[in-house]
Amino acid sequence: SDLLQHVQTRFSITPSKSLPLTFVHLQEYAHFLDRRSRFSLLMESWGTMRLAYKALEKVTPHLFFDTTGCAFTFFVARILAGCQVAAYVHYPTISTDMLALVWERRPSYNHNVNIAKSALVTYIKLIYYGIFAAMYGYCGSLAKLVMVNSTWTCGHVTFLWRGARSRMTIVFPPCDVESLKNL
């Protein structure tokens, strides 16, 4: 009931009492989402797939609605569990910006200075990122409906989830504008 109260307070939405809601508790599998130091994109995405599988073992909905941007879960939901998939993406798991940083060999949050110094290791990382981006794009394209929260996200997700381009729309997040009315 705390969660439903939060939804009502935050989004001004009162869920219908007739709407069947089932909460799936997965605390014992939280370790699936532990951060990884190497191959983090791949390993953490594998963790989201494992967690989605555990959740869908307990309850298999008609519609799997993702708001995390972890598109690898779409494979589990659609291919393994037979759900329809919808997504509201705030930030993609990998972006063309991330690919560009590695390509340009610029040290950054996703590109260690020691890797950036080496042309060979950077090339290997580009192969890894390219394969990951292709897999991410395939999984993202499994969604029947894709909503994104900004033009920036739309640009990146449109590029990566090519199979879902025709099913993508921008839905700007709700925000409280009451204080702005006083300006």
Image (tube, rainbow, N blue to C red):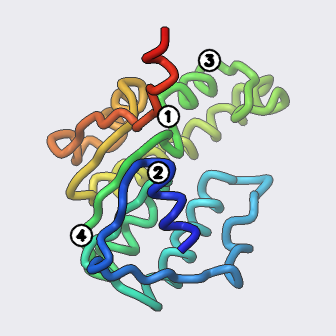
Q: Are marks 3 and 4 in contact (CB under 8 Å)?
A: no
Residue 108 image point, x, y percent: 73, 26
Residue 43 image point, x, y percent: 65, 62
Nearer to us in this view, 42 or 18:
18
Q: Tell me if 4 is positioned left or right of 65 in this view.
A: right
Above or below, 38 relative to 121: below
Q: State the CA–CA distance, disc 3 to disc 4.
A: 39 Å
Q: Amino acid at mark 3?
A: Glu
Residue 149 image point, x, y percent: 39, 35
First in residue order: circle 3 vs circle 4:
4
Q: Give the residue furthest to the left.
A: 166
Residue 24 image point, x, y percent: 52, 82
> Label 1: which residue?
95
Q: Quadrant of residue 135?
A: bottom left
> Label 2: which residue?
69
> Label 4: which residue?
84
> Label 3: which residue?
104
What secondary structure is found at the residue carrying circle 1?
loop
What secondary structure is found at the residue carrying circle 2?
loop
